[in-house]
Each structure stands twice: as C-alpha cells, then as structure tokens.
Image (cartoon, coloured by chain):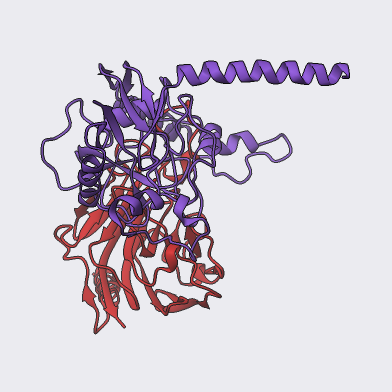
Chain colours: A red, B purple
Amino acid sequence: MKFVSLIAFSLISAASCAQIPDGFTPLFNGKNLKGWHVSRSTHQGTTPNFHIEDGAIVASQQPYGQGGLLMTDQIFRDFELYLEIKIDSFANGGIFLRSNEGGSAYQVELVLPGGTGDLVGERIPVSVPAEAKNREKVWKAGDWNSFRIRMTGEIPHITLWINGVEMWDVIQTKNDFIAGATEGMIALQCHWTAVYSPAASKGMPLSSWRPGATHRYRNIAIKKL
Amino acid sequence: MSTINKITIAFAQIMLIANQLNAQEKKTYVNSIGIEFIEIQPGSMVVGKFQPTTTKFGFIEQYMTKESGDMGIPVLPDSDYALSEELSKRDALPGFTVTISKSYYIGTFEVTQAQWKKVMGTNPSFFQEGKVSNADQHPIESVTWNDVQAFIKKLNKLEKGNASYRLPTEFEWEYAARAGATDDISWSEINASAQIAKLTTQPIGQKKPNAWGLYDMLGNVWEWVDDYYNEKIFADPVPPKKGKEHVLKGAPFYGDVKNATYMTHAGGPGSKYDVGFRLLMELK
C-alpha cells in the first residue's frame, strides 16, 4: 500500500513539474493541429504523418521513408519557446527556429544516440554551433523532457535549457539565415530515409528514422519578447 | 602547316558540322524580349513511380572501407531491415503513363530579372544587385502564381500575333525536365546539373544542361506550373480542378539532392525568394 502511494505521489510530482511556464501562450491546443501546417516545399518530405495522441503531437514518416516538417502558421522574431519532448531512439528530428517554408533554419537536434540538444544548421552553415555536453546529467531516458529555447536579435543570440538546466548560451558572429531573415516559423522535423528510386541513390541510413519510430511533443508554448 | 595544326583544323571543321547538325535537331526560338525556347517533341513518360530505397547504411556505404568499418552508423536489429523491406513494398507506387501528344516550346532557362523588368517595369526579387552580382541574369523570384499570370498576360499582348505564352502543366514541365529519362536522376547527375546547397540564387545556365538542352530545371528557384496542388506525394493522372496552392517543381537554390529531382511534386507558397518560373510557348 505504501509502495503504491509512493508511485502515485511520484507520478503526480512528475506531472506537476512538466507544465507551461507563466507568461507563455500555448501554440498547441492538445486536440488538433489548428495553427500548424505541413511544409509543401521541404526536401524532408511533403506528406508526413503528424497527428494527435493523448494530447501530444506524434511525428512519423508517411509513406515509408518520407519525413516532413510541421510548422507554425505564425512567424516569430524574438521569443522564448517551451515544449516537452519524448523521442524514440534511432530517429533524427529537431526543433527548427526562425524556419523558412522550405525548412532552412537554425536547429536544435533531437536524436538518440547522438547530439540531442546540439545547435546545428539546416540548409545553412551556422557560425557558432553548440553542444549540449551536460544533457545526460539531466536527461530522463524514455520519458518526457522539457526544452526551453530563447532566441533574440538580428544576429541570433540563442540559449537552451533542458529540464530547467542551461545547456548553452551562444551569440552567432553573423546572421546565418538565407536572405538575412530575422523572423520565421517554429517547425518540428521528422527525417527522411528513402529516396524515390534506387536510381537516385541509396538514401539515408535506416537508423536516421527507424521504421515505425515516433517523436512526441506536448505543452508547446511561446512568449514573444 | 604542321600535321598537328592540320588535325586541329580538321577536328574544328568536324565539330562545326556536328554543332550545325545539333542545331538543326534542336529547334530554338528567341522572342522579342530575348527569352529563348526549345521545341519539345511529343512522347510519353511514367509519372509517380515510387520505389523507396531500403538499405542499411544508405549513401554512406560508398565511403565505407575495410579500415573505416561502419563509420559509427548504428546497426539496427535485423527485424528492422526486414520491416523496412515490408513497408517499402507496401507503400511502393507503380506510377502511371502520361502521353504528351503535341509538341511545345519551353524556356531554355528560368525567366530572369532582366526579362521580368522588360515586360513589367518592376523587379520584386529579393536577390537584386548588391545582394548578388550580375542580378539581371539571376532568375526572377518572389513572384506569386498570380504575379506570373499578370506577366504572361502582358507578354501575350506584347508578342501578339507571333506566339502565345502560359505556364507549363506539371506534366509538360516534368516531360521536358526528364528529357527522355525513364527512372529517377542520380545524385551525381543532380550535382552536375542543379544549383543546390547555395545561399542565394545563381545566374542562369551555369550548370550542365539536361539531355534536351534545358538549364536549371532542377535547383536555383522552384518553378510554378499551371496545376493546382493535390496535397499528395505525387500528381494524380488528372490534376485537381480546385486547390489552395499551385504545384512547384524543380527545387530551390538551397535544395538537397533529396528533392532536386524531376519527380518532386511540391506545393506553394514556398519561401518567396525561392520561387520563380519558366514559360511554355505555342507558336501561332
């Protein structure tokens, strides 16, 4: 009995620490994809399966080997983004920041094993990349993890916190965006693995998105700065 | 005259004849604005044949040596590779045959900023002089499908009597882009012919043309075509009569080998600075 109540208590405390911080506006209503759209012009794929399960957005490939991007309809300049993420291993995704419609953006990587929490460029070179070296100290394996990303400035200044702990704080040496963009969409990535035909190439390693793998996102909210 | 010089002259003469022969085969036309077109002969092609690849290490396999081993690429359980084969078979599409029954002329290049300015007197492009050099020879971009219709309307007035212009249908575009190819284009051929992995648009005609002499069909800017987008991976045999957006073909300057293929069936709106077009012409 005591054991059961201990489990119940820890479940309640886990749920209570995972919540949208004060002053943030939800970007996702937990029920449908209102306010979001799929990119029709990214190389990741244009027909991904982003759907809702248990109040979370679930990302998976569709058809086999084709990924895609789910993007906010709104564009943002200076912001703090909060979201909770649960990812399968061997599935490469990411959070795209100030993305264009074609999915060129600064990206916080989501990949296990690998550089989850690293700052990289998608279709752009990033002047100051960053590594989340201390991620494993705070990471809850196989569970929900919260990400808080602050992005400001024409020359981007970006900070990442995972589960409330700062991972890195970097100021780029220049605006690396195509066309010097200072605003863009938030986008969630599901990586592609297969090309249309073996005549093109062998595609990506299968471990870039293991068949049937999913990424899940919930409590997505933003604070404009 | 040395023997080498004689051979050189003979070779040059042969090349001249060969070029003349090619020129006869390739019927071109330049309109009053200076837009060049190539005649495309009727024929057929298979569209939307989907044969998704299922390999363990993908393209990285070609870089693997005995010494390098698997280069740190994770190896999944055998059941995952078996599942990928199963899913690939489940989702494969046979495609469908499209017949092009009438010849038409298609732009040898994407419409440039200079050509747009000549017709419209404006330049909506983001990548103008100062942001890039030789901007006049860069493709026009930041044009909506409706902007292009206005351009075409004006051009049809200017060229009245000689020819009529419109956007190609997706199938007319893809047939010209394939230039006789029955399967997908290889990554090495994409790298040779497509302006991709760049940070700005590029002057037209810098990469290898396709087998029918058309430049930048893949890469540089997405190209509007006439059809509405069906929100599917590939076109349907009959394009939708209505839709929210129109189809984009060809991939942008920051594109990837993944989507810079004539098979890619994308949809608007794109990112403004990555969208342009090429024209189709019918001689009267």
**Quarter of the rendering containing residue B225:** top left
Q: Is residue B58 among what the camera can see?
A: no
Is A13 on the left-hand or right-hand side of B65? left
Could you tell me which residue is drawn at 29 percent across and 31 percent down? B281
Could you tell me which residue is drawn at 49 percent across and 57 percent down? B199
Q: Residue furthest left?
A: B242
**Quarter of the rendering containing residue B128:** bottom left
- Depth check, front residue: B218 or A211: B218
Is A130 on the left-hand or right-hand side of A12? right
The quadrant in which the N terminus of chain B is found is top right
In the rendering, at what x and y percent does residue B192 appear? 56, 36
Tell me if residue B200 comes above or below residue B231 in the rendering: below
Could you tell me which residue is drawn at 23 percent across and 25 percent down? B284
Is B140 on the left-hand or right-hand side of B56? left
Q: Residue furthest right?
A: B2
- Depth check, front residue: B73 or B175: B175
Could you tell me which residue is drawn at 24 percent across and 70 percent down? A8
Q: Is residue A10 among what the camera can see?
A: yes
- Depth check, front residue: B8 or A95: B8
Label tally: 0
Tell me if residue A110 comes above or below residue B139 in the rendering: below
In the rendering, at what x and y percent does residue B132 appear? 50, 60
In the rendering, at what x and y percent does residue A166 appear? 47, 79
